[in-house]
Amino acid sequence: MAASSSEARLARWRAAFKSGGYRLTSARVAVLRVLAESQQALDATRIFDRARVYEPRLGLVTVYRTLETMLALGLAQKVHCPAQCARYAAVEPGHNHLLVCRRCGRVWYFSGDDLGALMQAVAGESGFRVEDHWLQLIGLCARCRAEMETEGAV
Amino acid sequence: MAASSSEARLARWRAAFKSGGYRLTSARVAVLRVLAESQQALDATRIFDRARVYEPRLGLVTVYRTLETMLALGLAQKVHCPAQCARYAAVEPGHNHLLVCRRCGRVWYFSGDDLGALMQAVAGESGFRVEDHWLQLIGLCARCRAEMETEGAV
DNA sequence: TCAAAAATGAAAACCATTTTCAGTTACAGA
DNA sequence: TCTGTAACTGAAAATGGTTTTCATTTTTGA
């Protein structure tokens, strides 16, 4: 459940862009910064809104392009909520699984290494080659539960 | 890994529509039939194409509406592949987890009940209330692997 | 400083999904 | 079996998120 600081994350990402042969433009850095600072899974529009605080001339297209590059570099991942299927969150190295709050979109990482065995068993049995896996637990975080009770909502 | 026959599935689904207060129109039955018969996760357009064989006057809108009802009734579920995020597959009662072939879209179900403990642990630790979970293993099925080798592709 | 390549943003295109609405159909009750 | 009505349907239009296009700007290496 550890989280690296947003500065460390940003530094790591800048380095990843550089060594991937991508230029570090101010537009890109603005997008990186938003995701580095956020503990939520955000959609492109929300990232756009926040990044424009840093870079007012930023275009939405560049947000999409930068996100795509981040996915390619393994820096961010798509998060698939029931309601909305195209949110992006920072990748936390070594922690593959996600706990997603359906209300606030905040994301926690955890690792369940016992899954390796399960995946091996399933694969071996069927001749299937597992290339990727998704384990996402979706629900309500403690804070949102409290807030919803206060508001009388379900 | 058991699969009920498509006839049994269809009968179950008809009953579910009935007892849910939904009329059994020929348009709906055409959509139900396609998913009942398929072992793949299909997108709306493909379901539309196949269902028109049974009901040529069918409209795409009705496919979307019927799929939505099936989700509400718990008869089908959305499958989220990396490439395409809006496919639908039949729900296999009691088998919550999916093995999805990224090439042919075929779907296998399995249950990993050891996950319950993991989910409890994560939830208890953080005050998070888990409402839903997704475990999908994505990769290549044995058949597609063989076919791809034959074609010389990766 | 300069040229080439990469990256950008605005506008247009695209396409899956949803909404609207007038006509059709299933089905409960007579 | 017939009938009235609410549920349902399909065509067309609207919507909205994402991608493409392209002329301009920026970055970077020489």
Image (spheres, coloured by chain):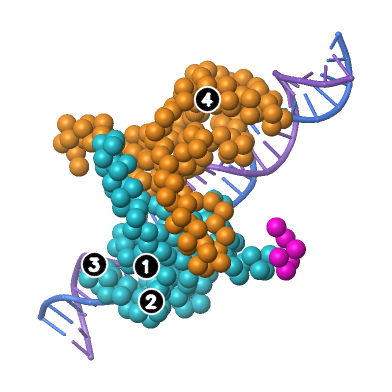
Chain colours: A orange, B cyan, C blue, D purple
**Helix, strand, or loop for circle 1?**
loop
Tell me how far mark 3 sits from mark 4, CA to CA. Answer: 50 Å
Task: State whether discs 1 and 4 lie on one chain.
Answer: no
> Which chain contains the residue that carries disc 3?
B
Crowd around label 4: few <14 · some 14–19 · many ≥20 (10 Å): many
Q: Residue B131 carries which label?
A: none
Tell me how far mark 1 sits from mark 4, CA to CA. Answer: 41 Å
Q: Which of marks 4 and 2 is in front?
A: 4
Q: Which of B41 and A59 is in front in this view?
A: B41
Residue at the (71%, 65%) spot, across then down: B149
Q: Mark 3 points at which residue?
A: B20
Tell me how far mark 1 sits from mark 3, CA to CA. Answer: 19 Å
Q: Nearer the viewer, mark 1 or mark 4?
A: 4
Q: What residue type is labelled 4?
A: Arg
Q: Name the residue under label 1.
A: B92
> Which chain contains the residue that carries disc 4?
A
